[in-house]
Structure formats: structure tokens, C-alpha cells
Amino acid sequence: MVWLPRCLSIELSLVLGTLIANRLPTVQSRPWRKALIPWDEYGGISLIKEKNLKQVPDASWPIETVFFCRHGKKTFGDGELILWELKLLGENADHNFFLEIILPVLEEAASTVNKDWQSPNCLWGHFDIHSIYVARGCNWEPLVNNGRLDLRYHATPLQWSEGLISDSIWLQRYHSLTWVTPFDLADNEKSKDREDSMTEIRPCEIPTMSSVLEALINRLTALIPGKHKAKKDLWDFLGVEEQEIFRDAMDKASKVSIRYKKLEPVSKLQPGRWIGTQQFYTIPKPVIPYLVLASIFHIGKHTHFGCGTFVIS
């Protein structure tokens, strides 16, 4: 029997990132060890056992990744499945990287018992890899099934987008946006100071339809290959027709008003700041494809830990 932590994505990032840094040759491991520095003041990987995390550090991997985990229960027994999703984004997203680096450390984390940083009922050292699936549009294709790896399968960089926007999506009317992981879209300096006593979200932090699309622009800009990209480079990356369609969606989003909101704060021991539901008078159809993209890529802060994704209904 294992007990999951308050936020599984945090431990996935720390444990797998540490094992990758230990596994790689010295030169290749440098960016991974640098990425682990924010964890040092909490004791590094030892905090898995000591549970001394006072707040979530601004940490991530050297490659753009998202750990997306949702669990209603914390205790799992023999034979029960623990589901989580890994997203590799940007120019370093590569199927071979997953096979050669990530999968081996997953296997190592599954079977390695180290009492220096593991407690008796923690996940690490107490699980088997049952199945791994790779996204193709809205479908999932098996890469590992019943513990057996399909070496003939090769994921392409764009298969996730195949048939993503179906014809049926235009037949529905959407009004609600429900955050399934906490979000923090605020970009002002004051938002950095978390106030645990705060139970009401500030007006400047309430996501509007426009601010969600702005956050998507920032997210996509950060994923453009190459360094030192300015925001305008995203528009250069798009064709003229795509720019017109996106700007039309932005214009329609700016006219959408919030009808109702129920947004509650999360503990400072969790990434993100708020979670809940918002209702709009309507969600314009031209905006829907961009909301789908925003939900897939995650937006705002702490996207590495899965923050900033939602569903529309």
C-alpha cells in the first residue's frame, strides 16, 4: 500500500529529474543539476521523506514538460492503477528522448528502494509500469501494454493534433470554464506574495476570456524554437490568414462578460493559486479552438506541475 503526496506532480518532477541528473554523463547532466538548485533550500530529494516543503519552488526541467495528475484518493493498494500524464513540449520534445532517458528512470524509480529519502509507504520503489499510451488527437495508442514495450511504435511530433477539433464541437454551445488544476494568471509583482488568509480572488486575477488567450500567446511564444523570442515573433510564426483568424478570436473574446464565478484558493503547499468554475454569457465559436489549445498546453505559472488547464462545457 502506498500513500500519494499532496501533489504527485511535484514528486514526479523532483524524483525523476534527480535520477536523470544522476544517470547522464557529466556534461549532459549540467542543465539537469542546475534545474535542481531551487530544491536545495528544501533539502533536495530528502524532502520526499521529511515532508518539509513550505511552499512550491519555481522549479522545472531543462526541457519544457508538464506533469498532469488528478487523483481523488491518496491511498492505493495492490493492483490499483495510478494514472498520470506527461507532456513534452517545444523543440526538445522527442520520442527517442522519452525511450532513452525518461522510461529508464521510470523503471529505476519503480524498483529502487533508498531509505535515505524514501518512507515505507511512499510511491517510489513500490510500483510497476503497467501501460503507457501516446496521444494521437483525442485517442490514446499503446506504447507499453501489460509491461511490454512496443519497439515498432514511433510517435511523431504532430500526431497529438490530428483530428483534435472535430465537427461535433461546433454543434454545441459553451458557457462554462472549469479549472481542473489550480491556476495563476496574474503577472503583477504583488501577486507573488501569497496570502493564505485571502479567500476572495482579486479582480485583477480573475481570468477573462481575453486574459486566457493572452496567456496562451505567452505560452506559445515560450515554446517557439530558438532563444530570446519576443512576443511579436509568435505573429511572425503564423501565416497571414492564421493571424487574421486569431485576431478575430481575440476581438470576440474581449466582448465576452463573466456571468458567474466560484473560485477558491488552494494551499500554498500546492502549485497555482485558485481553482473553481466560471460561467460566461457565451463562448464565441471562433474562440473555442484556442481554448482547446490553452487547455492542452496549460497556461499561467507552474505549468510544469500541471497548473493552468481546464475544460469547457
Image: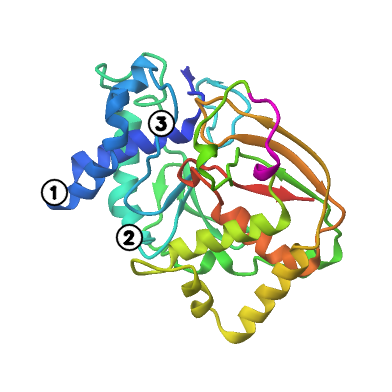
Q: Is residue 207 left or right of residue 175?
A: left
Q: Secondary structure at mark 1?
A: loop
Majority SS type along the magenta span: loop
Q: CA distance from mark 3 to mark 2?
A: 24 Å
Q: Amino acid at mark 1?
A: Pro
Q: Give the label on residue 96, or none.
A: 2
Q: Secondary structure at mark 3?
A: helix
Seen in the picture, residue 7 relative to 165 is either above or below; the reply is: above
Q: Amino acid at mark 2?
A: Asn
Q: Is residue 105 visible?
A: yes
Badge 3: residue crowd in 10 Å (few <14, some 14–19, many ≥20): many
Residue drawn at 13 percent across, 48 percent down: 25
Q: CA distance from mark 1 to mark 3?
A: 23 Å
Q: Position of residue 83 (x, y in %)?
A: 54, 37
| Residue that numbered label 1 is attached to | 25
Q: Position of residue 254 (x, y in %)?
A: 75, 63
Q: Position of residue 135 (x, y in %)?
A: 54, 57
Label 3 with label 2: CB-CB less than 8 Å: no
| Residue that numbered label 3 is attached to | 11
Q: Nearer the viewer, residue 243 or 181?
A: 243
Foreground label between 3 and 2: 3
Which contiguous range is marked in magenta?
Answer: 198-205
Q: Amino acid at mark 3?
A: Glu
Q: Is residue 20 left or right of residue 119?
A: left
What is the total number of numbered labels drawn onto the structure image? 3
Whichever of labels 3 and 2 marks the residue nearer the N terminus, that label is: 3
Whichever of labels 1 and 3 marks the residue nearer the N terminus, that label is: 3
Q: Is residue 84 visible?
A: no
